[in-house]
Amino acid sequence: MLDFTLLVQASINGLLIGGVYGLASLGLSLIWGVMKVVNLAHGVFIMLGAYLGYGMYHLLGLHPLLGMIIAIPLGAGAGFLSYRYLLHRIMEAASSELEMEMMCLLFTFGISIIIYGTALNIWGSDIRGIPALLPTLFLGELDVPSSRLIAFASALGLGLILLVVLKKTFTGKAIRAVTQNRAYVMLNGIDPVKIYQIAFSIGITYALMAGVVISLISPITPFMGGYYLLKCFTVVVLGGLGNPLGTFLGGLILGLAESYTSLFATYAISPAVAFITLILILIFRPGGILGTLR
């Protein structure tokens, strides 16, 4: 008979890691939902963010989350420059939407290979990490790792900020409008190219910030980008393109699914849960749980 305490513990673990999955997927969801660009470099930007957090702690002796001070301008600048001088030209040169999507796919794949190779040459393949900064919280027979709790709270806060920006600000409303009717947006004097540029910059910034948060709870290597890219694809398809609320909910569902799998079966097969979930969602609800951004 299953111990109720173990079930509650698995639920806590699943929710905490699921919130981080949701945060990691927000940037990919926004870029894919708004621009119809599948950013295969998303995972390596998460990896770079994790090294930012690692460097902030080990080189400067500061809290890893302060790495966001660097992640925000770095992500905004990288997104702005790469879209304006590279990605925009590729999108404009395409003769059809399908050709545009394929060219952007190859472009972001090339960027990911360049960043991955550079990181491997700089930091090597050694596994690095940040020690637990606070002791584990014990609630009766349950234990809550403080690092995961801080990571979850950070993920929730950053997710709410993006949701408010998209729902309440003029720029956010313009981003939502572009996803629905580009011609209508142009008739109202809004330049879709600038909106794409802003959306791409936000997406890259959120990938870096997610990496900073992940550095609190995960081993850091140049290889981690591929692992999180798979999780992000699953979460985005699960939650709906460009929908922050759906993305965060999708992350929680995936986190719980993996946690319950390790409880009822074995931890060795829990990575397969992402593949299985992705296939099932594509078959039964390809629009995601809450649909695309509106």
Image: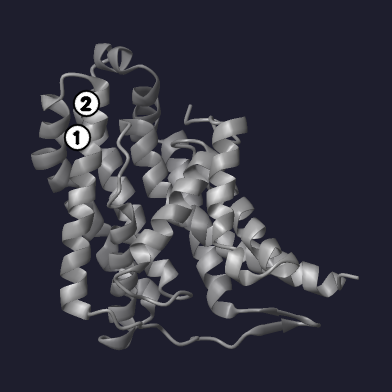
Query: CB atoms at circles 1 and 2 under 8 Å apart?
Result: yes
Task: Give the Cα separation between the discs numbered 1 and 2.
Answer: 6 Å
Q: Is residue 157 left or right of residue 80?
A: right
Residue 277: x %, y % from top left = 59, 47
Residue at horizontal 45 percent and vertical 76 percent from the top: 216
- Residue 198's quadrant in the figure? top left
Q: Which residue is mark 1?
A: 103
Name the one closer to the observer, 82 or 188: 82
Look at the numbered disc 2 and give the secondary structure of its residue: helix
Q: Callout 1: 10 Å neighbours few (<14), some, many (20+)? A: some
Q: Which residue is mark 2?
A: 99
Amino acid type at mark 2: Glu
Mark 2, residues whose alpha carbon is within 10 Å: few (<14), some, or many (≥20)? some
What amino acid is at disc 1?
Met
Tell me residue 234's x, y (percent): 50, 47
Q: Residue at x 59, y 88 (%)?
A: 135
Quadrant (top left/top right/bottom left/bottom right) for the N terminus: bottom right
Report whether 162 appears left or right of 252. Answer: left
Q: Residue furthest right?
A: 1
